[in-house]
């Protein structure tokens, strides 16, 4: 199995690194764009029902967009880590930290999806205050945590390159 992965990495290193970095750009960049550019703009919609409806739609689109790239990041990361032969080297510690960071980010992502889905159910039942309350930790706590962790993962990736 290890030999097969090493061979796969040797043959497709360009594409594996390309999709890893693309995944990082879309996941981390997508969260930053929503938090910094889209969320403040949404607050200018005065009608609270319209504001909540647009917020639910935008968060769903973001979460759907990043889901395949979360999987791609892990798969390409594991292939690179094995293909580059980090096992048994000090760099392997960095790989494990990246795996841990990815795991925490993915749990936080899944939690955000559950919160958004709950907010959607409350919204559809007419409980606008409940929907707003269910959504509020996403921009205020959960997205910022994942942005910070994503930046840490990025820095660890560069460190793995040997810089
Ligand atoms: C939160 C998710 C992650 C982000 C945002 C991320 C981001 C990055 C970035 C930006 C690079 C630098 C690429 C370069 O220019 O060399 C990189 C490299 C790397 N990442 Fe990740 N990564 C993530 C998760 C993972 C995971 C889960 C693993 C392993 C299981 C992993 C393993 C690696 C390895 C081995 C490299 C070294 C590539 C090289 O030396 O060129 N990454 N990562």
Image (spheres, helix red, strand yellow):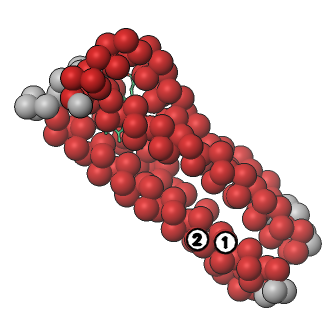
> Distance of mark 2 from mark 1, alpha carbons?
5 Å
How many tags in the picture? 2
Question: In front: 4, or 40?
Answer: 4
Residue 43 spot, x, y in % from top left: 79, 63
Q: Is residue 149 left or right of residue 156?
A: right
Above or below, comparing residue 11 to residue 53 in the picture: above
Q: Which mark is residue 117?
A: 1
Residue 152 spot, x, y in % from top left: 36, 42
Is residue 74 visible in the rendered structure shown here?
Answer: yes
Q: Quadrant of ligand 1?
A: top left
Residue 150 spot, x, y in % from top left: 44, 44
Q: Residue at x 30, y 43 (%)?
A: 98
> Are circles 2 and 1 on residues that touch, CB within 8 Å?
yes
Q: Is residue 70 left or right of residue 120?
A: left
Q: Residue at x 44, y 49 (%)?
A: 148
Q: Residue at x 75, y 65 (%)?
A: 56
Q: Residue beneath label 2, please?
A: 114
Quick one: SS at disc 2?
helix
The quadrant in which residue 137 appears is bottom right
Quick one: SS at disc 1?
helix
Q: Is residue 13 left or right of residue 22?
A: left
Q: Is mark 1 within 8 Å of ligand 1?
A: no
Dot 2 surroundings within 10 Å: few (below 14), some, or many (20 or more)?
A: few
Is residue 28 visible in the rendered structure shown here?
Answer: no
Above or below, comparing residue 23 to residue 108 in the picture: above
């Amino acid at each position: 199995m290890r030999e097969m992965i090493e061979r796969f990495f040797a043959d497709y290193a360009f594409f594996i690194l390309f999709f890893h970095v693309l995944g990082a750009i879309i996941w981390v960049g997508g969260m930053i764009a929503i938090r910094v550019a889209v969320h403040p703009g949404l607050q200018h919609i005065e009608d609270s029902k319209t504001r909540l409806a647009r917020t639910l739609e935008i968060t769903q689109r973001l979460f759907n967009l990043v889901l395949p790239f979360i999987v791609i990041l892990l798969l390409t990361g594991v292939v690179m880590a094995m293909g580059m032969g980090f096992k048994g080297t000090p760099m392997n510690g960095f790989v494990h930290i990246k795996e841990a960071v990815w795991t925490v980010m993915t749990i936080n992502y899944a939690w955000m999806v559950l919160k958004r889905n709950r907010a959607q159910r409350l919204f559809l039942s007419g409980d606008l205050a409940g929907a707003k309350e269910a959504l509020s930790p996403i921009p205020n706590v959960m997205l910022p945590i994942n942005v910070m962790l994503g930046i840490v993962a990025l820095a660890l990736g560069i460190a793995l390159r040997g810089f």
